[in-house]
Image: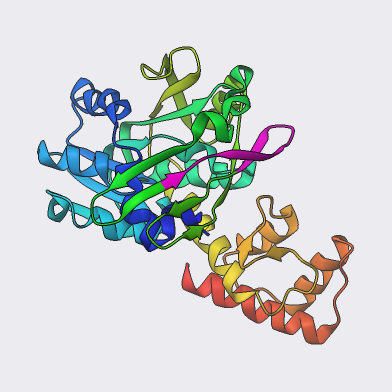
Amino acid sequence: MPDAIFDHPRVAAVYDALDPDRSDLDVYAAMVEEFGAASVLDIGCGTGTLATLLAARGVRVRAVDPAGASLDVARTKPHADAVTWVHGTALDALPVQVDLAFMTANVAQVFVGDGAWRDALTAVRAALVPGGRLVFESRDPDVRAWERWTPERTRQVVDVPGEGRVEEWIEVTGVGDRTVTFSSPTVFHRDGVRVESTSTLVFRTRAELTRSLEEVGFVVDEVRDAPDRPGAEFVFVARKTSDAGDADSVRRLRRRRDAAELFADLDPWGLIEGGAPRDEYSPEVDALLDLERPVTPDEVQATFTRMAQPVDMVDAFGLADAFNAVLARHP
């Protein structure tokens, strides 16, 4: 579920006014020309600043974001009618073939679990033509940027046309091994409404990011510095070398996502939480989702027994039906 800062209609409507300087996007716009890209996929496009900027220059743009309120704002901007807007994730943007894919700002860091990150990279790879590139930024954990995310340093009050004075700030509420959770309230002074939003970002090392890209079939061409935050961020440029395995990978992603929906009422063991697959599906469950034939109740029972999650035959029949509905939907 998107954070309120992006998906609350009133907050999304003032997002650009609270963050008006988007000169950080200049480097990405320049890369479109540098790499000779005629088409772009903007993942986590938010309110569409980069997407509409590129569309105005004649680039074919498909922009995707899970926050519907942000997309509503994006669709009102000049040149928005030249952009294909998609409400969802990178997987929802398929099928498409583009020369260049972007994850700007904090997008690459919202995929907290390694499984979720791997799935996102797999979907992006399928969206690229052979030789196409993925470019994204991620903060260097050694810089420990979150130590400066305090109310005293981040608080601002902006007079927004049509809305009046709007206040926001950031406050870190938790630091894990490589994750940081923070709150970012938005207060509308006109009527005193306060909208709470909590976000978690993951801080992967350069080596971890490189390995994750290579594991799904990217080649890392280079890691650049971020002009707006020199020495504080990695800007990865990764290249897809071939289409091999794309079709099977996308089918597996679609099966796993559909399984989350179908299993919601049939999963007392917590294999699937909150209507979405865990970041790391068990290999046994993945094996059933990879089958090219119907799953039998006996196979389900044996699989869950191996996982130390024994089920009776009634539940096994129900789970088998759920598995088979997913397999049939994505043959």
What's the magenta region? Answer: 167-182
Residue 39 at x, y percent in the picture: 21, 40
Seen in the picture, residue 205 relative to 129 is either above or below; the reply is: above
Q: Residue at x 54, y 53 (%)?
A: 197
Residue 201 x/y as whole percent: 58, 39
Look at the image and say whether residue 178 sits in the magenta stretch.
yes
- Is 100 on the left or on the right of 205, as rendered? left
Magenta region, main secondary structure: strand
Specify whether residue 329 is painted magenta.
no
Query: Closest to the observer: 90 or 325?
Result: 90
Residue that protrudes farthest toward the top in the picture:
231
Residue extending furthest bottom? 314
- Position of residue 148 in the picture relative to residue 244 (left or right): right
- Residue visible at 55% across and 72% down in the picture: 326
In the rendered image, residue 209, in percent from the top left (x then y), is placed at 56, 27
Rendered view: 209 above or below 276: above
